[in-house]
Image (spheres, helix red, strand yellow):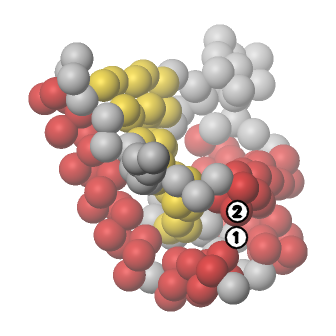
Amino acid sequence: MRVTKLKPLYVLAWRPVVKDREELAEACERSPVVQAYADVLSQDVDAHAGNIAFAWDEWQKLEKKYQAIEVYGYAPIPTLVGVWNDQNLLIEAVPWNAPPGGQRSPDGRPAFSMNKTNQPEGYLYFSRWFEDLLKHALQTEQSVVDRKERDD
C-alpha cells in the first residue's frame, strides 16, 4: 500500500498582541492598532477583537484535527490575507470599508483564488509574498511558542 504524504495548507492568522489565547480578545480590545484596524473595516472594536481571537481559536482547532494544516501567527498589520498550499491560493483583500450606512458590508470583503496550473505566474507572484510572511511568522517568538504548544 502506497501512503501519500499530504502537502501542508499554510494559514497565517493575525495576532497583533502576544498573549495567551484566553486573553487575546481582551488584549486586542485595548490595542490602538486593533482599534484603528476596526475603523478601516467599519467594525465595532469589541466585535473585531473577538473576531481575531475566534479566528485564531478556530484555525488552531482545525490544525489539531488535520495534520496537513499549519497555522502561524504574525503581528504586522495585514492588507491581504491568504491561505495556500503548493497548488492553490485563496486571497482576501482588506480594503477600506465605508462607515455604517456605506455601500459595502463589513462581512463581504473581496477575495480571489488562483491555481498553480491555471495561473502559474500569478500563483508564483502572490505565493512568494505569503511565503515571506510565513518566514517572518516562523521567526517570531509567538510562533515558536504556538508550534511547541501544538506539538505537546
Q: Position of residue 70 (x, y in %)?
A: 52, 60
Q: Position of residue 140 (x, y in %)?
A: 45, 82
Q: Is residue 63 left or right of residue 75?
A: right
Query: Disc 2 marks which amino acid?
Result: Lys
Residue 53 is tagged as: none
Q: Residues within 10 Å of mark 1 (few under 14, many from 20)?
A: some
Q: Nearer the viewer, mark 2 or mark 1?
A: 2
Q: Residues within 10 Å of mark 2 (few under 14, many from 20)?
A: some
Q: Which residue is mark 2?
A: 64
Q: Residue at x 58, y 58 (%)?
A: 67
Q: Position of residue 149 (x, y in %)?
A: 67, 83
Q: Is residue 72 left or right of residue 47?
A: left
Q: Residue at x 32, y 69 (%)?
A: 135
Q: Secondary structure at mark 1?
A: loop
Q: Is residue 131 left or right of residue 95?
A: left
Query: Disc 1 marks which amino acid?
Result: Ser
> How many marks overall?
2
| Sequence order check, earlier mark of 2 and 1 | 1
Q: Front-most of 45 and 136?
A: 136
The extreme top residue here reads 103
Q: Residue at x 69, y 36 (%)?
A: 42
Calculate the distance from the C-alpha at mark 2 to the C-alpha at mark 1.
Answer: 28 Å
In the image, residue 118 above or below residue 97: above
Residue 13 visible in the shown view = no
Q: Position of residue 137 (x, y in %)?
A: 43, 71
Residue 34 location, quadrant: bottom right
Q: Secondary structure at mark 2?
A: helix
Q: Which residue is mark 1?
A: 31
The extreme left residue here reads 121
In what quadrant of the picture does the C terminus appear?
bottom right
